[in-house]
Image (spheres, rainbow, N blue to C red):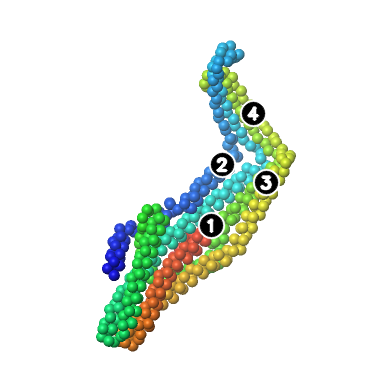
Amino acid sequence: MILSLLAVLQVASAQDSVPVVTLAEALQRAARLDPGYVAAAGQVNSAEWARRAAFAVFIVPAVTVSANKTHYWPPFFNFATFTAVPNTYSATVDARIDLFTGGQKLAGLAASGAALEVAHAGELQARLTTAMNTELDYYGVLAQRALERVAEDQLQRAQQQFAVARARVTSGAAVQTDSLQLALGLTQARVILLQQQAALRAAQLQLGRRIGLEGPADAAPVAADSVAAPALPFTVADAVGRALAQGPAWRIARANERGASAVLWARRGDYLPHASLDFTGGAFDTKFYPQAIKRSSLSLTVSFPLWDNGQREIQLSQARVTRDVARAIRTDLERAAWLDVTAAYDAYETSRATFALQRDAVVVARENNRVQETRYRAGATTILDLLDAQNRLVSAQADLVLAIYNTRLARAGLEVILGERINFEQGSP
């Protein structure tokens, strides 16, 4: 018993040194550290540069500048200067712009726009998923803390009832079995408290990992935990419309279909002639910068692909299959919108109802436990009825804690699907 008390005191002193963070701080810190979100943000940057490049090919030529120095031994005879020179220098400028590519430039522009849309939707999805996972860890700490308080209350009641049972056994009002039963319950309450404290430490370490700490982090209490969550400010039909319009999964599916269609368009451009304009300027000399000999050329090249051993047809077929697959994925997601959104919507509403039910269940279980304690003190009931009432109260309190935070997590899951944070005051993002 003394060892158990020492362990509790050590845990309490260790908890005092754990840094406390608010939910807003946890969300802000986790967003910068989550690998999925960091990767998604990087994809947005890459897609933006690809979009700029797709615009640039219409007006900006591809330019290459090169310089060369060659050393000879023995020196070679330069017929231009009639001297032996050990070194020669050359410089070249090449510029090329495609005048017509069978529509492939326009296809590339469309594909880059679709890729940018995919990147933005993916970044939003990663941000909301990171927020959901952070809330999961944050509320996990709060839930374990609340369950720890439940275990502490259970231990306190077990101690009080054990003292009552000992007094009744001593006075002859009860048999020795009653005190033995309550002694076992007291030991179980101590073990449950230690297990709950271990679970709390694990949850704090997970939260600390989520926000970038090497050790544990504690969650600041959230206001209105005992108040029922508000009803959603929109109907299921409105939620489905929002998901189809701005949900990350549906945005990504539509953009992937547009990108695949653009690639198919580009592959068809291989059947049309291509025209390009090339400029080359060069200089040669025995010193740098070379100026002795200068040559420039401007050429217009028109090519018409006739046959490349079926490679063009293979690429066209692959692009068409990819487009068809992307279209099938998009249509399937749109058909599943009612199912997915309704399931998330109902999960939130069910969690709200469960919270109200469990809150009433705690009131009933607490009153039933009080009555059984009074009746046991008066000798009007058995120890088994008292233990059953205690167990029902502990179970109801634990279920209430889970119901509180399951509602919050259901809301976070719905936000990931809708692609927005739900504003319960205005019903809009």
Q: Given the image, on which type of amino acid does mark 4 rest?
A: Leu
Q: Is residue 14 above or below residue 367?
A: above
Question: How many other residues sit within 10 Å of disc 2, few (<14), some (14-19) or many (≥20)?
Answer: some
Residue 374 in sight in this render:
no
Q: Given the image, on which type of amino acid does mark 1 rest?
A: Pro
Disc 4, SS: strand
Question: 230 or 387: which is nearer to us?
Answer: 387
Q: Is residue 421 above or below residue 380?
A: above
Q: Which residue in the protein does label 4 denote?
A: 298
Question: How many other residues sit within 10 Å of disc 1, few (<14), some (14-19) or many (≥20)?
Answer: many
Q: Position of residue 352 (x, y in %)?
A: 45, 71
In the image, which is nearer the foreground, mark 4 or mark 1? 1
Question: 153 or 361: which is nearer to us?
Answer: 153
Residues at discs 4 and 2 in contact (Cβ within 8 Å): no
Q: Which numbered disc flags the more N-terminal residue, 4 or 1? A: 1
Q: Which numbered disc flags the more N-terminal residue, 2 or 3? A: 2
Q: CA distance from mark 3 to mark 4?
A: 33 Å
Q: CA distance from mark 2 to mark 3?
A: 23 Å
Q: Which residue in the protein does label 1 denote?
A: 248
Q: Which residue in the protein does label 2 denote?
A: 53
Q: Which numbered disc flags the more N-terminal residue, 3 or 1? A: 1
Q: Quadrant of the N terminus?
A: bottom left
Question: 6 or 368: which is nearer to us?
Answer: 6
Q: Which numbered disc flags the more N-terminal residue, 4 or 2? A: 2
Q: Position of residue 52 (x, y in %)?
A: 55, 43
Q: Given the image, on which type of amino acid does mark 2 rest?
A: Ala
Q: Which residue in the protein does label 3 denote?
A: 315
